[in-house]
Image (spheres, rainbow, N blue to C red):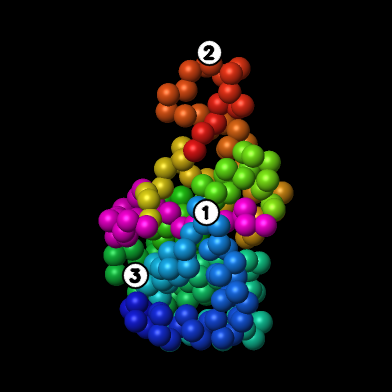
Amino acid sequence: MTWDEFKGDWFPAHCAAFTGIRAWLAKISRGDGAPTEAQIVKGWYNVLREVDLEAANAATARMHAGDIEEPKGFDRHPAAIRRACGVQRQQSRYEPRFDADGNQMFACRDCLDSGFVLCWTEKSMRAMRDGTFGQPYTVYSTYIVCHCPAGNQHDGRREFPRYDAKRHLPILMGTWDDGDRARLAAFVGNMRPANYDPALESATENGGTF
């Protein structure tokens, strides 16, 4: 779908079906370092841009009716709609491949050939480091452009950095839970600044920086 179709048709219809989205957007965009509403909405579009408008609207209707399971967290809605429209995605450059048993194969294990990786934001990593993760306005996710060829089609958009496994941590669960929380804590605890000196570690809190 085009940007005009997304902002003028699918997004308003999806917000009408799931009336908490507008309030959620206003809430999570508050505070220093939080993503803006425009960045979040543009990220949604970049996930859905290869999906046909009619198919996306049908998927929204099915999710609203309960035929498609609604993910826990509005930020997971674009990926769920995209998955529901999998057979109707316009993928001229990245056609799905299957093995002899019918299992779908992916060239990139990080983004599964979508071009985007859902990751924790810097603000959430800071909150985990400071021991405040889980408090209001500390749990944020964002889409990062993948390092693979599928991500190249999205490169050059200033609001989306390229995925780097040393700097970004993907969210693997359907919604953040103890497993994701433990992975984030371990990731933050192992981070080191570029000029890290082991001899100075005792003089710092944990050697991490952002």
Percent across and percent down for residue 205 are: 61, 26
Percent across and percent down for residue 158 are: 32, 56
Compare residues 180 and 98 and report the one nearer the observer: 180
Give the residue pinned by disc 2. Answer: 199
Q: CA distance from mark 3 to mark 1?
A: 38 Å
Q: Considering the image in quadrants, where does the N terminus appear? A: bottom left
Q: Amino acid at mark 1?
A: Asp
Tell me if label 2 and label 3 are in contact, CB under 8 Å: no
**In front: mark 2 or mark 1?**
1
Q: Residue at x 40, y 79 (%)?
A: 6
**Secondary structure of residue under mark 3:** loop
**In front: mark 3 or mark 1?**
1
Looking at the image, residue 67 lies above or below residue 162: below
Tell me which label, 2 or 1, sits earlier in the chain. Answer: 1
**Secondary structure of residue under mark 1:** loop
Looking at the image, residue 98 lies above or below residue 132: below
As for residue 139 lying within the magenta part, the answer is yes
Percent across and percent down for residue 59 are: 53, 81
As for residue 67 lying within the magenta part, the answer is no
Magenta stretch: give its range.
136-159
Tell me which label, 3 or 1, sits earlier in the chain. Answer: 1
Give the residue pinned by disc 1. Answer: 32
Give the residue pinned by disc 3. Answer: 91
Q: Residue at x 40, y 85 (%)?
A: 8
Left of 80 or right of it: where is 2?
Answer: left
